[in-house]
Image: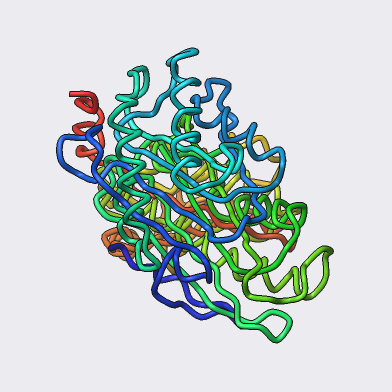
């Protein structure tokens, strides 16, 4: 399992257990026959009907499970999530919609709940029909194997090209009650979420209304999953779902205030940790990169520039080759659509100042344009590390934001040149 290095914030501490750490949640993962041998079907269940919220891909081409789950979430309530990997059930027309609804109905039948309380997710190859009979049998097997320790099995069952599972959980206190938040996700390629290929499932025993849960989830996704990129492609299947069953017994969070903000802090620890795990597991990736933009006029400006730089293939290939080509960084920032002063902007690779006020650090205009102070060797050393930080200081305001990405390597091309074979 890929462990998160994201530090616990304030009241929140890391704990084992993933989506089954919060009270009243069970999970399982099984092989149903979509893949040749690996687990390919996951089930997550709350013993009590939960408040639920989701964020979804903005891609106009939406997979059948996305459409069905969006429809089911109109009630703001859910009892289970069923997800398969190996087949996206996307671009499959009415057959795909029928199969997504069959998945919900089969899970509802074995769990004794309404089909509208079951949320459906799929990931994998686009344009192929689900082997729905196999999936239905897998749902029955998964239901019989539900366990309060089943998070890791569910995390394994949703993987496609991922090299490792991704799960995290934290504990904290709200209203003098011990509470927990857990999550699992998958994602390695086709990662450039814009909602929200990636799936994320979050559970909590916090008592919170659907409206406030949705508000917290959207805010948290904007600060985490929506600030990562592996290859600039937005999937047809992206979704992040949160379920809150209230079994912690805290006073219900129904408005903004200190309890809501505390919940948001814990939720962001979970989503940011999972988001970073996706980037570190990017297809073919060898390096994890944080692009920090500081000194911006607004947070939106900082986010836009950070994500534009992080998604630049020229920047990502330079990082792979440990080439301190800072001009690519500044050029990417300049096409982000944000108004800023290039002649004021500094660029750092690690702690090495490579560009000062829009020119190479040490650029001597009086000396025929010679750059005599740029520590190229230091910058190359910074880029040779597995964890890299690039900082862009706009020097025009007090807002900041970070985006996370990885290098673009030969192996990314190899993986995606033969994805369906």
- Residue at the bottom extreme, as displayed: 176
- Return the residue nearer the eye: 217 or 245: 245
Q: Is residue 346 left or right of residue 162?
A: right
- Return the residue nearer the eye: 293 or 101: 101
Can you see residue 356?
no
- Determine which quarter of the picture holds residue 409: top left
Q: Is residue 375 above or below residue 406?
A: below
Q: Position of residue 106 (x, y in %)?
A: 44, 36
Q: Position of residue 270 (x, y in %)?
A: 52, 64
Q: Position of residue 407 (x, y in %)?
A: 33, 47
Q: Residue at x 25, y 32 (%)?
A: 34
- Quadrant of the image containing the C terminus: top left
Q: Is residue 308 above or below residue 127?
A: below
- Return the residue nearer the eye: 343 or 241: 241
Q: Is residue 254 left or right of residue 401?
A: right
Colour scheme = rainbow
Q: Residue at x 62, y 45 (%)?
A: 54
Q: Residue at x 19, y 32 (%)?
A: 414
Counting the numbered discs, the total is: 0
- Return the residue nearer the eye: 379 or 64: 64
Q: Is residue 412 above or below residue 270?
A: above
Can you see residue 299?
yes
Q: Position of residue 30 (x, y in %)?
A: 27, 48
Q: Residue at x 50, y 74 (%)?
A: 170
- Quadrant of the image containing the N terminus: bottom left
């Amino acid at each position: 399992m890929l462990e998160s290095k994201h530090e616990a914030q304030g009241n929140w501490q890391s704990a084992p257990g993933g989506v089954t750490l919060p009270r009243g949640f069970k999970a399982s993962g099984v092989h149903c026959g979509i893949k040749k041998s690996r687990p390919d079907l996951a089930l997550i269940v709350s013993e009590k009907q939960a408040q639920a919220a989701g964020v979804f891909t903005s891609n106009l081409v939406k997979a059948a499970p996305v459409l069905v789950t969006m429809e089911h979430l109109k009630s703001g309530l859910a009892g289970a999530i069923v997800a398969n990997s190996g087949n996206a059930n996307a671009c499959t027309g009415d057959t795909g919609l029928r199969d997504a609804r069959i998945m919900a109905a089969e899970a509802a039948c074995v769990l004794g709940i309404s089909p509208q309380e079951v949320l459906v997710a799929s990931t994998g190859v686009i344009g192929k029909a689900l082997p729905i009979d196999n999936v239905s049998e897998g749902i029955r097997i998964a239901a019989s194997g539900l366990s309060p320790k089943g998070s890791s099995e569910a995390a394994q069952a949703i993987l496609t090209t991922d090299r490792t599972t991704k799960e995290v959980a934290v504990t904290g206190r709200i209203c003098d009650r011990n509470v927990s938040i857990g999550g699992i996700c998958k994602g390695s390629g086709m990662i450039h979420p814009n909602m929200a290929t990636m799936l994320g499932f979050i559970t909590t025993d916090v008592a919170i209304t659907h409206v406030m849960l949705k508000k917290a989830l959207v805010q948290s996704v904007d600060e985490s999953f929506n600030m990562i990129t592996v290859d600039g492609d937005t999937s047809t299947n992206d979704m992040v779902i949160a379920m809150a069953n209230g079994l912690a017994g805290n006073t219900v969070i129904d408005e903004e205030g200190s309890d809501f903000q505390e919940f948001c802090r814990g939720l962001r620890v979970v989503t940011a940790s999972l988001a970073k795990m996706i980037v570190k597991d990017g297809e073919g990736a060898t390096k994890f990169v944080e692009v920090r933009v500081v000194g911006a006029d607004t947070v939106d400006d900082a986010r836009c520039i950070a994500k534009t730089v992080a998604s630049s293939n020229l920047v990502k290939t330079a990082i792979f080759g440990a080439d301190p080509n800072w001009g690519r960084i500044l050029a990417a920032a300049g096409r982000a659509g944000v108004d800023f002063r290039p002649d004021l902007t500094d660029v750092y690779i690690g702690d090495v100042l490579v560009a000062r006020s829009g020119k190479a650090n040490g650029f001597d205009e009086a000396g025929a344009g010679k750059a005599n102070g740029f520590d190229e060797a230091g910058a190359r050393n910074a880029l040779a590390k597995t964890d890299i930080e690039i900082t862009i200081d706009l020097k025009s305001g007090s807002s900041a934001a970070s985006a996370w990405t990885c290098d673009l390597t030969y192996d990314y091309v190899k993986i995606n040149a033969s994805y369906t074979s």
